[in-house]
Image: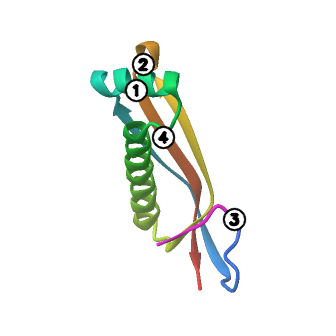
Amino acid sequence: MMLTTTPTIEGRKITHYHGIVTGEAIMGANVFRDFFASIRDIVGGRSAAYEKELEKARRIAMEEMSERARDLGANAVVGIDIDYETVGSQGSMLMVSVSGTAVTVQ
């Protein structure tokens, strides 16, 4: 499955548009990770725990979107948009949503 944020794939011809496909992943944030991340925010630096969770959520959402495209008979998804949100009470969960257009390319 080819995945791209661009509307076309250079050197490939889109022969069929299957429609919009999406994928979502919501990950709960661990209390201890929240605590250590808040300390890191105070002293500066990056929060590896949150980065890992975001990467995991993004991978899950992309896999879900790819599976939905495959189910439609597509071999690529173009025009992918990735969004990040915090959801739940006090932003206790991380959500990644992806969407794109499922297509068949030659």
Q: Which residue is mark 2?
A: 88
Foreground pick, 11 / 67? 11
Q: Which residue is mark 4?
A: 96
Marks 4 and 1, how far apart in space?
10 Å
Percent from the top left, x then y, of residue 43?
A: 50, 25
Foreground pick, 100 / 48? 48
Q: Which residue is mark 1?
A: 93
Residue at figure coordinates x 66%, y 76% from the top left = 9
Quadrant housing residue 80: bottom right
* Quadrant assignment for the C terminus: bottom right
Marks 1 and 2, how far apart in space?
6 Å
Badge 3 marks a residue whose secondary structure is: loop
Marks 4 and 3, how far apart in space?
19 Å
Identify the main secondary structure in magenta: loop
Determine contact: label 2, label 4, CB under 8 Å: no
Amino acid carrying label 2: it is Gly
Percent from the top left, x then y, of residue 68?
A: 42, 58
Q: Which residue is mark 3?
A: 6
Q: Is residue 91 above or below residue 74?
A: above
Percent from the top left, x then y, of residue 72?
A: 46, 64
Q: How many marks?
A: 4
Q: Residues within 10 Å of mark 4 (few under 14, many from 20)?
A: many
Foreground pick, 76 / 50? 50
Numbered range of the magenta stretch = 1-5
Determine contact: label 4, label 1, CB under 8 Å: no
Q: Could you tell me if residue 56 is visible in this image?
A: yes
Q: Which numbered disc flags the more N-terminal residue, 2 or 3? A: 3
Q: Which numbered disc flags the more N-terminal residue, 2 or 4? A: 2
Residue at figure coordinates x 30%, y 21% from the top left = 31
Q: Could you tell me if residue 30 is visible in this image?
A: no
Q: Which numbered disc flags the more N-terminal residue, 4 or 3? A: 3
Residue at figure coordinates x 37%, y 48% from the top left = 56
